Image: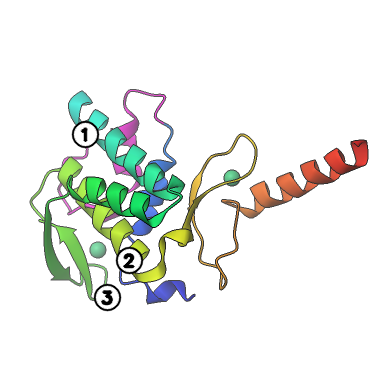
Amino acid sequence: MDYDDYGSDAVELAVDLANADRADDGWASAFCAAHHEWFTEGTGLELSRKHAKAAGTTADLVREVALASSRVEVVERLNALLALASPRPYATDHDGTLHLHYAAPEAGALEQLTTTVAMGLSQVVVQHGWERLGVCAAEGCGNVYLDTSRNASRRYCSSTCSSRSTVAAYRARKKS
Ligand SMILES: [Zn+2]
Ligand SMILES: [Zn+2]
């Protein structure tokens, strides 16, 4: 699967959001600041407590889509996520390449975030299959990942988790 074939790489934003550390109260504002390239220039990226909570709900839904074990579940969870979005697509070449943005440029940070995540994720799941989205099998990780391998055979979020698990399995075998 050629990653460049994606109509949108907004799915990366969805995966990052699902994996964001939400321990700190200001996590949502910090997340938006770290991903500012996804927002229209000039958008206020400080999220209120209420908006941060809503961003957390979106993050949970992305994870639930990744955890789904049947198509029925995927459809249900994707639609729950899409219900939070307010799409108003428009074409732009702000970064030099022509592409689509999903949320109205003048929308607030939360609306831009939710809509971009919901539309980007749905697009990829619909085009490439829900099996492409998974949750890392390494003990204690739990990161959501997108499997871009040719045969959709990935089980880990990173090569670090993959080799860590291989070592753990080897030690367990040796012990027994
Ligand atoms: Zn853009
Ligand atoms: Zn992992």
**Can you say whether 156 is above or below 46 in the image?**
below
Q: CA distance from mark 3 to mark 1?
A: 28 Å
Q: Which residue is mark 1?
A: 46
- Is ligand 1 closer than 8 angstroms to the Cβ of mark 3? no
- In the image, which residues are magenta? 22-46
Q: How many marks?
A: 3
Closest to the observer, 119 or 96: 119
Q: Position of residue 72 (x, y in %)?
A: 34, 53
Q: Which residue is mark 3?
A: 97
Left or right of residue 33, residue 106 in this image: left
Give the amino acid at mark 1.
Answer: Glu
Give the structural element (helix, strand or loop) at label 3. loop
Q: The residue tagged with tag 2: helix, strand or loop?
A: helix
User: Picture coordinates of residue 83 (x, y %)?
Assistant: 17, 47
Label 2 vs label 1, nearer the camera: 2
| Label 1, residues with CA under 10 Å away: few <14, some 14-19, many ≥20 | some
